[in-house]
Image (tube, rainbow, N blue to C red):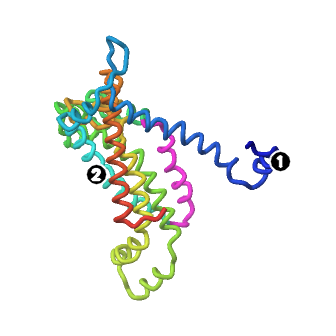
């Protein structure tokens, strides 16, 4: 039984939610649900270049994953990158947000300038820091050598113990302003009465920050950490541009490994498996954090 034209017309031109939801549902199916289902299907197959076909291999890719030492190594590098970047961005973001939490003239301009770093593509930022950390003419390398922190024989991005720190500098420089803006918005929304009472009681700035600011900002901090944490675990641009995973495997992250298996070695099935594992880890960690931090969406 087909619906009457009048019913269809009323559904389209009235306040019925279906016409408004259809574009969103279409985008969700095309860009989220279909790629996910295809990736799951692809993880049980492998591309055979000489025959140019996808061959069913069952659970071979999943078994190979657990036996792959490179996977575990890249996972360790990813977690290390994730923890260091998140700690520095949160600490610096909170410190800068506290400094900018003022209504004095000029602070609005400073807050606006923070957004400039966010509009630069990560690949461009990676190239900027690649040049700044160059062992011959990099301005950052020159400054570190001038103050005696770095020797001329120790290039930053070619030394295994320093390469990850060199990539992290680009990450922290670009995304600390993001943390600042979120935390600053939270600080500006805090009520003033508790601070006035604390001032009357003679509380020190440190006591006020620990006992008032941090507890009242806990939900804002949790949301900022959640958003940045999800993005950090998928890091690719900076590593690809600056080191390509080197020297050796010192900066070899999980996303870079999945990209290499998929596009360099033409192992589409194994690359899909690595991507699905990355997605599963992010989902598990994000949901655990939401539960522990009691974040409500």
In which quarter of the view is residue 260 placed?
A: top left
Q: Position of residue 90 (x, y in %)?
A: 36, 57
Crowding near pointer 2: few (<14 within 10 Å), some, many (20+)? few
Say whether residue 41 is magenta: no
Measured in 3D between alpha carbons, the distance from the residue under mark 1 to the one under mark 2, in whole angstroms, is 58 Å
Work out whether residue 245 or residue 94 is closer to the camera in this orientation and state it.
245
Identify the residue at horizontal 31%, vertical 55% (top origin).
87
Q: Is residue 214 above or below residue 6?
A: below
Q: Position of residue 151 (x, y in %)?
A: 17, 36
The answer to whether any part of residue 138 appears in the image is no
In the rendered view of the protein, which quadrant contains the N terminus?
A: top right
- Secondary structure beneath label 2: helix
In which quarter of the view is residue 56 placed?
A: top left
Q: Main secondary structure of the magenta part?
A: helix
User: Circle 1 sits on which residue?
Assistant: 6
Crowding near pointer 1: few (<14 within 10 Å), some, many (20+)? few
Say whether residue 108 is magenta: yes
Identify the residue at horizontal 41%, vertical 72% (top origin).
213
Work out whether residue 148 or residue 232 is closer to the camera in this orientation and state it.
232
Residue stretch rendered in magenta on the structure = 102-122
User: Circle 2 sits on which residue?
Assistant: 83
Q: Is residue 23 above or below residue 157?
A: below
The mark closer to the camera, 1 or 2, is 1
- Looking at this view, name the residue that lies furthest to the bottom: 201
Q: Is residue 197 above or below residue 296?
A: below
Q: Position of residue 98 (x, y in %)?
A: 43, 65
Identify the residue at horizontal 76%, vertical 45% (top origin).
3
């Amino acid at each position: 039984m087909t619906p009457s034209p009048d019913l269809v017309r009323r559904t389209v031109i009235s306040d019925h939610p279906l016409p408004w939801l259809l574009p969103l549902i279409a985008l969700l199916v095309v860009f989220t649900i279909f790629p996910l289902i295809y990736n799951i299907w692809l993880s049980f197959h492998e591309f055979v270049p000489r025959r140019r076909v996808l061959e069913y291999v069952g659970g071979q890719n999943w078994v190979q994953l657990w036996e792959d030492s490179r996977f575990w190594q890249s996972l360790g590098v990813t977690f290390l990158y994730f923890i260091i970047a998140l700690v520095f961005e949160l600490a610096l973001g909170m410190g800068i947000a506290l400094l900018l939490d003022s209504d004095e003239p000029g602070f609005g301009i400073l807050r606006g300038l923070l957004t400039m770093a966010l509009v630069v593509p990560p690949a461009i930022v990676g190239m900027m820091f690649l040049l700044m950390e160059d062992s011959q003419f990099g301005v950052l390398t020159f400054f570190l050598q001038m103050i005696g922190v770095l020797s001329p024989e120790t290039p930053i991005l070619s030394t295994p113990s320093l390469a990850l720190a060199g990539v992290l500098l680009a990450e922290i420089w670009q995304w600390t302003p993001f943390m600042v803006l979120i935390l600053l918005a939270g600080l500006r929304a805090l009520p003033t009465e508790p601070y006035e009472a604390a001032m009357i009681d003679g509380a020190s700035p440190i006591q006020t920050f620990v006992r008032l600011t941090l507890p009242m900002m806990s939900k804002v901090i949790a949301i900022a950490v959640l958003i940045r944490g999800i993005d950090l675990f998928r890091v690719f641009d900076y590593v690809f541009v600056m080191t390509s995973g080197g020297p050796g495997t010192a900066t070899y992250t999980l996303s870079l490994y999945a990209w290499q298996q998929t596009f360099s070695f033409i192992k589409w099935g194994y690359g899909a498996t690595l991507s699905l594992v990355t997605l599963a880890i992010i989902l598990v960690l994000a949901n655990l954090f939401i539960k522990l931090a009691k974040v409500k969406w």
